[in-house]
Image: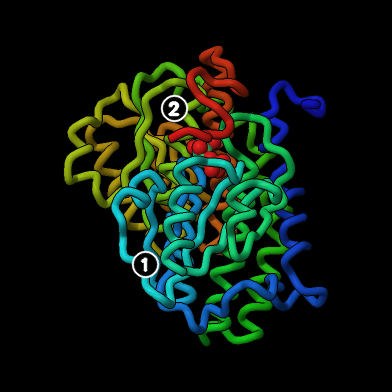
Amino acid sequence: DKGGHRHFMAKEIAEQPHVIGEALSHYLTADGRDIALPDTMPDFAGVDRLVLVACGTAYFACVTAKYWFERIARLPVEVDIASEFRYREPPVADGTVALFVSQSGETADTLAALRYCADKAAHVVSVVNVPESSIARESGTALPILAGVEVGVASTKAFTCQLTVLYLLALKAARQRGHLDADALADRLSALRSLPGILNHALAQDRSAKKVARKLAEADDILFLGRGLMYPLAMEGALKLKEISYIHAEAYASGELKHGPIALIDKRMPVVVMAPRDALFDKTVSNMQEVMARGGKVTLVTDEAGLAEAGDGVTHTLVMPTVADDLAPILYAIPAQQLAYHTAIAKGTDVDQPRNLAKSVTVE
Ligand code: F6R
C-alpha cells in the first residue's frame, strides 16, 4: 500500500519524521534525559576501539557515525565496507566493539564480516531494521532502527533511522566515557526530539527539489560536494541519484576538489553542494566559488544563514531549516532523497525497482 503516494519511495521519504519519532520513543528514557540500551550492550567506558562495517547506504550511515563517535565520544573508529573488511583479515583486539549496520539484516558480506569478528571474540553489535534477520540473531546485541518495512529498493527511511540510532549510541558513549554530563546529554536529546518537526519543514520543500531535479535530469554526470558530516551525506546523495536515475554521480570531500576532480568542472556538469552554515561553511564556500569561477553550475543546499552569506552566483538553492550541526546529516538526507527521486521521475525510470538491483543482497 503506497498510502496515496505514487511510489513506495515517496511514501517512505514522507514517513521519516514519524519513524524517527518512533525510534526516539523506543530508546529515550521516560524522562527524556537518557538513552536506554539492552543489558547486553557493553559499556563504552571500557571500549578502546569501535569498528563499523556495512554496505552501500548503511556504510554511509557508518561513515557519518565515525564523525560523531570520534568528536563527541572521543572514541577511535574504523569504518569499512563489508566486502573489503572481511577479506583483509584485519586484527580485532580485545576491547574492540564491532558494529554492523544493515537494513535487511541479510546482506551476505556484512554477515560474513560479522562472523569473522564474532570468531575473534569481539563483542558484536548490530543496528538492523529486521529484528528476526540473520545479522540480528548472530549479534551479541541487536538494536532495532524501527523504520518499519522498507519496500523501495533505494533506502531512505532506513538510512535516517540508522543515523538516529547511531547518533544515540555516540551520545551514550560520550556520557559513559565522561565527555558529556547529564545536562548536556539531556539538552542534546531535547534537540533530537524536535527533529521530526524540522524534517517536516524539509519535506515541504519538495516542489523546489522537483524544479532543480528537472535540470539535473539533463546531465550525464553530477558531482556532490560536502565537508565533515556533509561528506558522507554527499556520498549517499550520489549513490541515491545513480541507483534510481542511472545518471553517473560521484561525491568528493570538498577539500579534495583541487586534487583532481576540479579538472572535470564545466557548465555541463551540475555540482550539488551540501553545506549548512556550520563551522566548516566558509571552507566549503571557497571550494564552491572555485567551481563557479570555472563555469560550474551549483545547486547549494543550505539554510537561511548560509544563503544570505553565499547565495550570490549560485544557480539553484534549496533552503533547509536551521538545525543543530550534529543533526544536519539526518535533515539534509531529505533533499538528497528528493533530488534523486524527482530526477528519476523526470528520466522515466522505475523508481521503486531500479534495473539490476535487489532489495536484499544475499550473495556476495
Ligand atoms: C542503497 C541501498 C543499498 C543497501 C545495501 C546494504 O539505496 O539500498 O546500497 O544499503 O545493499 O543493504 P542492507 O542495509 O540491507 O545491508
Using the rendered view, name the quadrant where residue 288 is placed. Answer: top left
Q: Which percent across, then down, holds residue 251?
A: 35, 40
Q: In the rendered structure, which amino acid carries the disc numbered 2?
A: Lys
Camera-side residue of 96 and 337 = 96
Using the rendered view, name the quadrant where residue 311 is placed. Answer: top left
Q: Which percent across, then down, holds residue 356?
A: 48, 20
Mark 1–mark 2 Cα distance, whole angstroms, equals 34 Å
Q: Residue visible at 35% across and 35% down? A: 250
Secondary structure of the residue carrying numbered label 2: helix
Q: Residue visible at 65% across and 43% down? A: 157
Q: On residue 313, which mark appears?
A: none
Question: Which one is closest to the eye, mark 1 or mark 2?
Answer: 1
Residue 70 is at least partly visible in this image = no
Q: On residue 242, which mark appears?
A: 2
Q: Which percent across, then down, holds residue 97?
A: 47, 69
Secondary structure of the residue carrying numbered label 1: loop
User: What is the crowding at mark 1: few (fewer than 14 residues within 10 Å), some, or many (at least 20)?
Assistant: some
Q: Which percent across, then down, holds residue 327?
A: 57, 59
Q: Is residue 213 above or below residue 180?
A: above
Left or right: 130 as drawn, with respect to 79: right
User: What is the crowding at mark 2: few (fewer than 14 residues within 10 Å), some, or many (at least 20)?
Assistant: many
Work out whether mark 1 precedes mark 2 in sequence or the reverse, and give the earlier one.
Answer: 1
Q: Residue visible at 48% across and 74% down? A: 72
Left or right: 61 as drawn, with respect to 247: right
Q: Which residue carries the number 1 mark?
A: 92
Name, please, the residue furthest toward the front.
119
Q: Are marks 1 and 2 in contact (CB under 8 Å)?
A: no
Q: In the rendered structure, which amino acid carries the disc numbered 1?
A: Val
